[in-house]
Amino acid sequence: MAMRNAYVDQFPSEARLISAAFWSSFLALAIGGSLGLVQALHRTDYLRFIDSVDYYTVLTAHGVLLAITFTIFFLVGIFTWAVTTSLDRGLEDLRFSWAWYAMMVVGTVLVGVSILGGVVDSIDMQADVLFTFYAPLQAHPAFYVGLVLFVVGTWLAGADWFRTWWAWRGENPDERIPLPTFMTLTTTLFWYLCTLGVALSILVLLLPWSMGIVDSVNPLLSRTLFWYFGHAVVYFWLMPAYMMWYIMLPKLSGGKLFSDPLARVVFVLFLLLSTPTGIHHQYLDPGIAEGYKFIAMTNTMFLLLPSLLTAFTVVASMEHGARQRGGTGYLGWLKALPWRDPVFTGMALAGLMFAAAGFSGMINAGMNINYLVHNTWWIVGHFHLTVGTAVALTFMAAAYWFVPQVTGKQLWNRSLALGQVLLWFVGMTFMSNAMHRSGLFGMPRRTAEPQYQGFNFEPAAGTVGEINAQVALGAALLTIALALFLLNMVMTTIGGESDAIPDNTYAGTLSGPEDAPVVLDNLKLWTAIATVLVVFAYTLPLASIIDAGGLFGPGIEGFQLTIGIDPAIVLESVREVMP
Amino acid sequence: MASATEKQETDRVREIGHDEYDPVGTAILIGIYFLILVLLWLFMYFVEFLGNGPTVVGALQPVLLGVGLA
């Protein structure tokens, strides 16, 4: 019998850390995902067993647990694997690594408990502030402290990957940075750059305000600092998915990565452009001049370049694999791809959904067209294609390969895994297309009961009932897919060790790093340019926001949803802004 | 550092090197994707400009009237 050479055999200590990070991620996925079904049934009025005020607690938990906890715990596992595997050396000090993991866990628990306080009376906290925690919605200080701990944990994780690379570079001064490490480091660099904004927003504005140290907040300033981070965070989730498409999909397809230099260019472009684009989430915010929004739009449109480069490189790598497996013809090679492999199929379908999300993203990015869909369910449809499928489905498919690697146990049921990724794809097709379409006729997002007396939505095609049915059906299929995924993971983990685990490898390249200009590996240069772009995009808007509203705003007190808002006050404030 | 990169592939029936490989199928798929994007952009013109009155400007009051707030 051949020697097994899985990740757990090469790096047993790191494998335990990655395994723990994965399970933290899966737990968040289980809770956050189930809450999604509650929301879908409530909004569409198929089944309402929670109070509509509690809808916003559930929505906050769904957003934070899935967009922050599920994604980031999984990606710290992936990045740790990428650095250790491609540098062929372990982390420098496992005590430090467990410390950042523990910090992320403590942060998550604080955030989770404070959100849960919105529906559990015995917890004297609340954080019904949604994923974006816009002021003047105000959360318990524990929510903000938890977020800070979580983010600082990720900073330390990034430091861990950097010090591993520095140690390797000391011994290999003339080598190119291996591609998976290069991807991890560039992603970490823009994560440092963008999280500065949210750290400032929390530590300077929101936390002191929630603790009563200052008695007012500037909502526009905190929103702008949030989106300074809030768009880059989507690339923080997406880059590990891209990494999987670049270094796993070609191998699974039976081929090689078409071009290592192109992959490096793509990751450099994301380092440069992820952050100075955030204002495109604020096209409808009064108080930011159109010119600044136009700069953000231009930067956003440039981001299409690395995404389209990725579409080309990844598909060309798959085609290379298919042709090596005997595929022929203009499109006949598609049949030669390993469609029965859940890891391949999950990632390929995730990529296909991402292509559809590319179109709705272009609509969101255009300033004038954005007005049509802003704050509607279109946006929710869009990000269920991006983070909800391109990222989540890639991660689930990746887990079918990674969990056996880090545990030494064979995947419990491959056919079930294949069915699961297909079911997710079908469920999301139903749910997301209906969400997009309902946005076109103005159905709002973040609304527990989008049914109004004396007013009917008028879809151009189909009916509101049909759209609601598709959303509820889609959400139900997604929940079943989620349960099947978790079942497979649990059964795999409690199963016995197996010798049939494939070797821990990633794709080779047709055109390797030797073809890439050396300047691509100059991380200091790219970080400096990224910083300059951020300074250009943000200095004037931030200065003008502070100039207009003051650092702490004009006497803005916090709203705490669960504690209750008198409807008469809401009506009065609406009347105040009416012409 | 290529020690961890893939060396063996069981289902491979032939080896295609960098110079023999011409990703024509990829060009076709990307072409189809661009065509879809162009058609959707054309369709958007009808949704955005012909399907609605002017957005934002003057849109608040009718909506609020509709839901009975004003």
Image (cartoon, coloured by chain):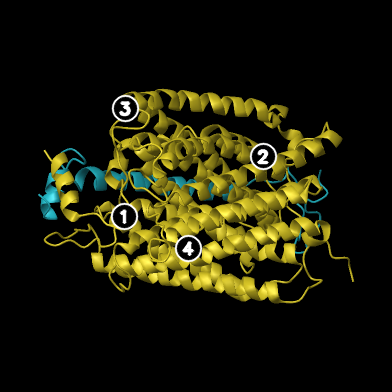
* The label number, if any, that marks residue A501 in the structure image: none
Q: x, y percentage for residue A52?
A: 29, 64
Q: CA distance from mark 4 to mark 3?
A: 37 Å
Give the yellow chain's letter: A
User: In the visual, does A513 lie left or right of A465?
Assistant: right
Q: Are marks 4 and 2 on the same chain?
A: yes
Given the image, on which type of amino acid does mark 1 rest? Leu
As drawn, the label of residue A561 is: 1
Q: Colour of chain B?
A: cyan
Q: Name the N-terminal-most of marks 3 and 2.
A: 2
The amino acid pointed to by label 4 is Gly
- Residue located 48% across and 73% down the image: A480
The N terminus of chain A lies in quadrant: bottom right
Q: Which residue is mark 2?
A: A185
Give the residue type that dot 3 points to.
Ala
Mark 4 and mark 3 lie on one chain; the one further toward the N terminus is 4
Residue A350, how many percent across, how many down?
53, 57
Mark closer to the chain start, 2 or 1: 2
| Total number of numbered discs in the rendering | 4
Please determine if labels 4 and 3 lie on a single subunit. Answer: yes
What amino acid is labelled 2 in the image?
A: Leu
x and y, in percent, of residue A155 in the image:
62, 42
> Considering depth in this image, is A326 or A456 the residue closer to the camera?
A456
**Residue holding disc 4:** A32
Residue under label 3, please give it: A289
Chain letter of mark 4 equals A
Give the spatial CA distance, label 3 vs label 2.
Answer: 34 Å
Residues at marks 3 and 2, common chain?
Answer: yes
Secondary element type, mark 2:
helix
Circles 4 and 2, Cβ within 8 Å, touching? The answer is no
Give the alpha-carbon distance from disc 3 to disc 1, as whole Å. 31 Å
Measure how far apart labels 2 and 1 are at the Cα level: 40 Å
